[in-house]
């Protein structure tokens, strides 16, 4: 006899699984279709971006991309370097993980474990897409000037840009829904962080513009899937 996940959870709840864990499991099952759809759509977007940027339009886009990076590099100064380094740091795990733990912990304490779960999956999903596509397409990073900040891994897509739009977009929705902050505040802040992080990657010369654009688009699709799931599960 086929045992569905819901039936298994129901049996476990009878056998002593805490109600909170039971409903968290139900939330995870309910979110699964949104998760799979978002990952598939994001992967499709990244594949199209890679094909356009590296195969079909490579000769047309490369001079434009190089010009964009060199133009930004002309604006470089020690003060701007320090500011941009701080901005780009906002999308790194050293910042996003403590934010996730802090906000997620408060959400769990307030009985919104499903929201904390989706916030976690939102960040992890962007990491997954980034890691898979970097390993698969293996696009080399720009090397137009000497830089000690250039990472050693591959360029496409921009994981910072993808994490910024998906994580801070979800964070904005949670702060407005469960902490009473106005969307008129949280959305502009999340948008500013997203744009700032993406531009910082170009200023530092560690990504091509198409890496950042593809990261934004795929991250936006993943964000939309997470918000749809969160709305379905939590009534956001």
Image: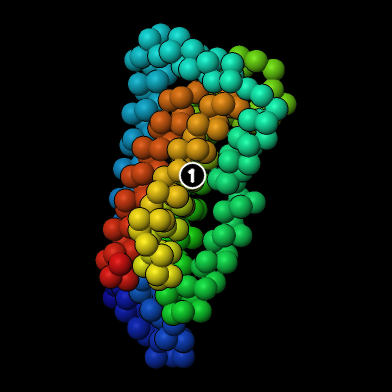
- 54 on left or right of 33: right
Circle 1 crowding by C-alpha within 10 Å: few under 14, some 14–19, many from 20: many
**Label 1 sits on residue:** 193
Name the residue furthest right.
148
- Residue beneath the point at 50% across and 14% down: 66
Say which quarter of the image contains residue 97: bottom right
* Above/below status of 181 relative to 61: below
> In the displayed structure, does residue 100 sit left or right of residue 112?
right
Front position in the image: 197 or 160: 197
40 relative to 152 in the view: left or right: left
In the image: residue 155, left or right of residue 223: right
Q: Position of residue 181 (x, y in %)?
A: 41, 65
Q: Quadrant of the N terminus?
A: bottom left
Residue shown at the point (39%, 91%) measured from the top left: 14
Q: Is residue 166 above or below residue 155?
A: below
Residue 186: percent from left, percent from top = 41, 56
């Amino acid at each position: 006899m086929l045992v569905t996940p819901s039936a298994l959870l129901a049996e476990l709840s009878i056998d002593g699984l805490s109600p909170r864990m039971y409903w968290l499991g139900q939330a995870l099952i309910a979110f699964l279709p949104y998760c799979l759809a978002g990952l598939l759509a994001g992967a499709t977007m990244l594949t199209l971006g890679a094909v356009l940027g590296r195969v079909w339009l490579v000769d047309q886009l490369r001079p434009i991309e190089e010009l964009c990076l060199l133009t930004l590099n002309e604006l470089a100064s020690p003060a701007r370097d320090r500011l941009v380094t701080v901005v780009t740091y906002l999308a790194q795990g050293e910042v996003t993980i403590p934010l996730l733990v802090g906000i997620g912990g408060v959400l769990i304490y307030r009985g919104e474990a499903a929201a904390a779960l989706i916030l976690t999956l939102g960040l992890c999903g962007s990491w997954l897409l980034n890691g898979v596509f970097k390993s698969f397409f293996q696009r080399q990073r720009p090397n137009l000037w000497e830089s000690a900040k250039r990472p050693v891994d591959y360029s496409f897509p921009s994981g910072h840009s993808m994490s910024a739009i998906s994580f801070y977009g979800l964070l904005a929705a949670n702060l407005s829904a469960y902490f009473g902050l106005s969307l008129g505040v949280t959305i502009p802040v999340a948008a500013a962080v997203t744009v700032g992080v993406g531009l910082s990657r170009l200023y530092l010369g560690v990504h091509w513009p198409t890496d950042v654009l593809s990261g934004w688009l795929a991250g936006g699709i993943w964000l939309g899937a997470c918000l749809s799931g969160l709305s379905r599960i939590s009534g956001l």
